[in-house]
Amino acid sequence: MIAPEDDIDRIMAVMEAAFPPEFGEAWNRRQLIDAMIVGNCRYGLIGPEGDEPVREGDEVAGFFLARSVLDEEELLLFAIHPSFRRRGLGGILLRRFIETARNRGMHRLFLEMRRGNPAAGLYAAHGFRPVGIRPGYYRTTDGVRLDAISQELVLV
Ligand SMILES: CC(C)(COP(=O)(O)OP(=O)(O)OC[C@H]1O[C@@H](n2cnc3c(N)ncnc32)[C@H](O)[C@@H]1OP(=O)(O)O)[C@@H](O)C(=O)NCCC(=O)NCCS
């Protein structure tokens, strides 16, 4: 799924504001476009009222990017702009991701997060369970190594 330029712009604006720079988790524009071209990727946007901003120029508060292979889908990126946090938008967007995956026939969802990310509580509340650890997978800009925790949600 290749996004219109306007969506790429709006995703990048959230990306650049949302991810703490020390963990190097944000993607650049090229990586985002490449994933959409070569990977079997889809994305979703959320507006400040929990709506789906469908018109060009509508304000975007957050997004997700996911890639599927057969009946499995990985949540690659998931973020809410700092100005719109702790109002439930992350929960709405995560639920939307899960429900749309289910409707597309997915049976297993994955994601990977760095140990200590506060998003862990949100993922757990939506049924994700830790299934593996990659020790020292992430490296901060100060050279500190952090584990990646793989999480899974089996859809029935
Ligand atoms: C993770 C993120 C998407 C959450 O977005 P959000 O809109 O604030 O999430 P919600 O308002 O729906 O929060 C739902 C619950 O998650 C938990 N939660 C979310 N952010 C939290 C934080 N910073 N600290 C502690 N708990 C948090 C809380 O339980 C919260 O419920 P509450 O507000 O009633 O206490 C957002 O903080 C973000 O974009 N972070 C940076 C990007 C990132 O790390 N993405 C995940 C990569 S794996």
Image (cartoon, rainbow, N blue to C red):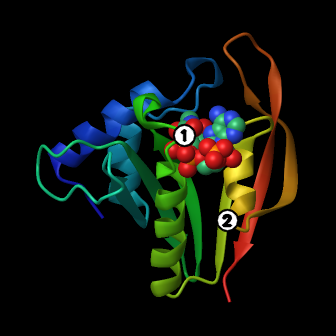
Q: Is residue 26 visible?
A: yes
Name the side, left or right, on which 59 lies relative to 70: left
Q: Nearer the viewer, residue 88 or 32?
A: 88
Task: Give neighbour class at mark 2: few <14, some 14-19, many 20+ (Cα, 10 Å).
Answer: few
| Mark linked to residue 58 | none
Rendered view: 38 above or below 85: below
Residue occupying image coordinates x 53% and y 60%: 94
Instruction: Please identify the quarter of the rendering in which residue 115 is found.
Output: top right
* Label 1 C-beta lies within 8 Å of the nearest ligand 1 atom: yes
Instruction: Please identify the quarter of the rendering in which residue 50 is found.
Output: bottom left
The three-letter amino acid code for the residue at tag 1 is Arg
Secondary structure at badge 1 equals: loop
Where residue 77 sits in the image (x, y, percent)?
51, 48
The three-letter amino acid code for the residue at tag 2 is His
Q: Is residue 29 visible?
A: no
Q: CA distance from mark 2 to mark 1?
A: 16 Å
Residue occupying image coordinates x 46% and y 29%: 82
Q: Nearer the viewer, residue 90 or 102?
A: 90
Q: Which residue is label 2 attached to?
A: 126
Where residue 52 sits in the image (x, y, percent)?
28, 60
Q: Earlier in the sequence, mark 2 or mark 1?
A: 1
Rendered view: 118 above or below 68: above
- Which residue is most to the left? 56
Q: Which residue is label 1 attached to?
A: 86
